[in-house]
Image (cartoon, rainbow, N blue to C red):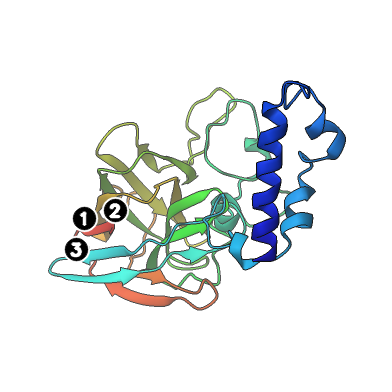
């Protein structure tokens, strides 16, 4: 109460000064400049940790507001919580390509080009991956909320999947695993995946070998959305056994703690709807 009273008195005094003919303009008299009122440290020094002025509960930049997410498949639904982290989703995913693909005509694919690393896979989600399993989750990072998909586990059996995305919120695929171009701007001969994501619905055909994974990350989906994933795995996919063998046997939606998330098993042949409430 003491601080509140002091502020009230201060505001009254300033109002009187600004209106006084002898003192001139409030800004002309140098009050802000000379007395340091515009110093960013003023709020901390003057207000301290008074709970009356506490704004710690207000959403900060890059933080997801309190939002409930619902995941539905067939006649069943469950609430999901975004996995949270302090790195951009590109870094979380960790899509690496050989340095030879690091050139000015390379498209937006979210890749890094390190020397002597594992390539053509999601190196950042290895702890979350499971053999012959597709994982899907929402990720809340410093640059917004993203949808993340990773197919299979490194050193798995390979496989293929084709997904259709309907009514995706405004955003973009910031990780495209795999999509990599030659220096001429053409898709590389070893890049078999198809990314048709310039219109609604969007479609992606993935296929991967035993030494990699496939997937992607779509950011920023915001906090008001309702979109559908229409999955086609294995023999239903467009690239089934054209380049690699192997199958996906499980599909899981991850929720909660990024170190030890809850895993909800999904059907491989039912549409998935993800929405915010």
Between residues 125 and 180, which one lies in front from this camera angle?
125
For residue 38, above or below residue 177: above
Secondary structure found at label 3 = loop
Quarter where residue 201 is shown? top left
Residue at the extreme right of the image, as rendered: 34
Q: Position of residue 274 (x, y in %)?
A: 28, 58
The reply to whether the C-beta atoms of the residues labelled 2 and 3 are less than 8 Å apart is: no
Secondary structure found at label 2 = loop
Secondary structure found at label 1 = helix
> Which mark is drawn over residue 236?
1
Q: Is residue 160 left or right of residue 143?
A: left
Q: Cα distance, mark 2 to mark 3?
A: 15 Å
Q: Is residue 260 left or right of residue 133?
A: right
The reply to whether the C-beta atoms of the residues labelled 1 and 3 are less than 8 Å apart is: yes
Residue drawn at x 44%, y 45% is: 220
Between residues 36 and 144, which one lies in front from this camera angle?
36
Q: Mark 3 — residue?
A: 269
Q: Position of residue 264 (x, y in %)?
A: 32, 75
Residue drawn at x 34%, y 31% is: 198
Quarter where residue 248 is shown? bottom left
> Which mark is drawn over residue 240?
2
Q: Earlier in the sequence, mark 2 or mark 3?
A: 2
The answer to whether residue 250 of the structure is visible from this angle is no
Q: Earlier in the sequence, mark 1 or mark 3?
A: 1
Q: Position of residue 173 (x, y in %)?
A: 44, 42
Q: Cα distance, mark 1 to mark 3?
A: 9 Å
Quarter where residue 52 is shown? bottom right
């Amino acid at each position: 109460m003491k601080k509140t009273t002091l502020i009230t008195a201060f505001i009254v005094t300033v109002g009187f000064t600004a209106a006084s003919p002898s003192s001139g303009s409030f800004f002309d008299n140098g009050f802000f400049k000379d007395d340091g009122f515009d110093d960013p440290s003023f709020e901390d020094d003057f207000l301290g940790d008074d709970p009356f002025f506490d704004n710690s509960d207000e959403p900060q930049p890059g933080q997801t507001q309190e939002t409930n997410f619902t995941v539905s498949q067939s006649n069943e639904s469950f609430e999901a919580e975004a996995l949270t982290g302090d790195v951009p989703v590109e870094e979380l995913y960790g899509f690496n390509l050989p340095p030879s693909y690091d050139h000015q005509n390379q498209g937006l694919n979210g890749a890094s080009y390190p020397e002597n690393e594992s390539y053509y896979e999601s190196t950042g989600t290895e702890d979350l991956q499971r053999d012959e399993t597709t994982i899907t989750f929402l990720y809340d990072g410093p640059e917004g909320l993203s949808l993340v998909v990773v197919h299979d586990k490194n050193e798995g059996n390979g496989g293929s999947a084709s997904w259709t995305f309907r009514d995706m919120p405004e955003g973009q695929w910031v990780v495209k695993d795999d999509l990599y171009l030659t220096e001429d701007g053409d898709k590389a001969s070893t890049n078999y995946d198809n990314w048709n994501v310039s219109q609604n619905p969007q479609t992606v055909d993935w296929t991967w070998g035993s030494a990699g994974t496939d997937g992607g990350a779509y950011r920023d989906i915001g906090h008001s959305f309702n979109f559908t994933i229409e999955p086609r795995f294995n023999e239903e996919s467009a690239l089934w056994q054209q380049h690699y063998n192997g199958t996906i046997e499980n599909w899981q939606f991850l929720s909660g703690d990024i170190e030890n998330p809850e895993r909800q098993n999904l059907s491989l042949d039912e549409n998935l709807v993800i929405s915010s409430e």
